[in-house]
Image: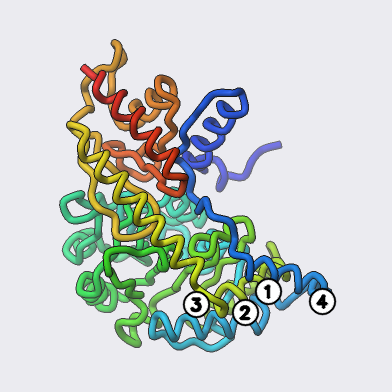
Amino acid sequence: MKLADRVKNISPSPTLAIDARAKKMIAAGEKVINFGAGEPDFDTPEHIKEAAMAAIHKGMTKYTPVGGTMELKKAIIQKLKADNGLEYTPEQIVVSVGAKHSLYNAMMVLLQPGDEVILPAPYWVTYLEQIKLAGAVPVIVQTRQENGFKLTAEELLSVVSPRTKMVIINSPGNPTGAVYAKEELVELGKVIEDRGLVVISDEIYEKLIYDGCEHVSIASLSPALKEQTVVINGMSKAYAMTGWRIGYAAAPTEVARAMIDLQSHSTSNPTSIAQAASVAALTGTQEPLMEMVAEFRRRRDYMLQRLNAIPGISCNTPSGAFYVFPSMARYIGRQYKGRQINGASDLASLLLDEVKVAVVPGVAFGDDRCFRLSYATSMENIVEGLNRIEQFFLQID
């Protein structure tokens, strides 16, 4: 059978590929430290699991409305108002099978073939693939480490063209953990409003934030920006619910309606039981979330201290998410036991082969000078993994 052209340029997720390779080595009995995970290592809180079990016992096992139950939509609306100062109606909320699905729906209903999408790098790998699937053209803007890996208004303005349709903002960001300050978003918002651009604001890591930083949604800055923005969020990261697959979008009514129509012919409704659990997550106690954030910060601080103590490694302090994104630029062009290092990809391969540590090479995110380490793993693993990383780098010629 001949495959459709749209799938020929899709690249498999490098993050999942690294994780799969590491797990295969572990299954073979090797002691691998895996820093590739993109999910919390905490269990889903008990009150959320109990809500799911109660939904099963009540017989909540049938189809729901395609765009989500009214109960969950109301919980999302209340969350957006309380946390983000945003007001939406139920018709403007679309619940999907994970935030990745929400992003896909938004891209499919908003982008035409040939539209340009401004994508700051480093970027989450799926943005690039979804842009291509929609037939649009990614315009990648390389951000600077010294600027916290954040897109500036000047950089945005420099790449806007008559074909520009959309810009993607991810704050807190994956893979860098960067969090945009309100004043930075205000400056970006001026360009976005003036040029009439669509914004995809991916806020999935919103609750995982440190050092007194404030999460600000660009949609909250003005009525015009709200009408130009699709806010994406979900349950996976904040509530350790990656496997439950519930994400959501808040969008202008016409966009939301189109997303629901598209979803009605793909997945139909998200799982009814997971929706019930999500209501409990949003409306119930937030204590487990706060405990998780405190532990993530402890791990982050330790990881930063260890990485920045290794000669030649430079790592920004991430203000959100659960990743660090250290630069390996000073090692590019050097050798390890006769093997040439041409980029962070070579370093990631060597780390897995030589010291059994799995990291995700930055080429997956559009920057092969760095690699991503997740601190969504135990402190024991972090200590052992960093011991191995330090040992490795001290042997580079």
What residue is pinned by disc 2? 72
Q: Residues within 10 Å of mark 1 (few under 14, many from 20)?
A: many
> Which residue is drawn at the image coordinates 29% and 29% (left, top)?
390
Query: Would residue 93 appear left or right of 299 to someone viewing this image?
Result: right
Mark with earlier residue (3, 1)? 3
- The image quadrant that residue 226 belongs to is bottom left
Residue mark closest to the camera, 3 vs 1:
1
- In space, the residues marked 3 and 2 are separated at their CA atoms by 13 Å
Measured from the top left, where is residue 138 in percent x and y? 37, 53
Tell me, yes or no, whether the two marked residues, 2 and 1, touch with CB atoms within 8 Å.
Answer: yes
- Say what amino acid the circle numbered 3 marks: Ala
Q: Out of 14 and 39, give the one closest to the viewer.
A: 39
Q: Is residue 252 above or below residue 324?
A: below
Q: What amino acid does circle 4 point to? A: Lys
Image mark for residue 276? 1
What's the amino acid at mark 1?
Ala
Residue drawn at the location 22% of the way across and 55% of the way down: 148
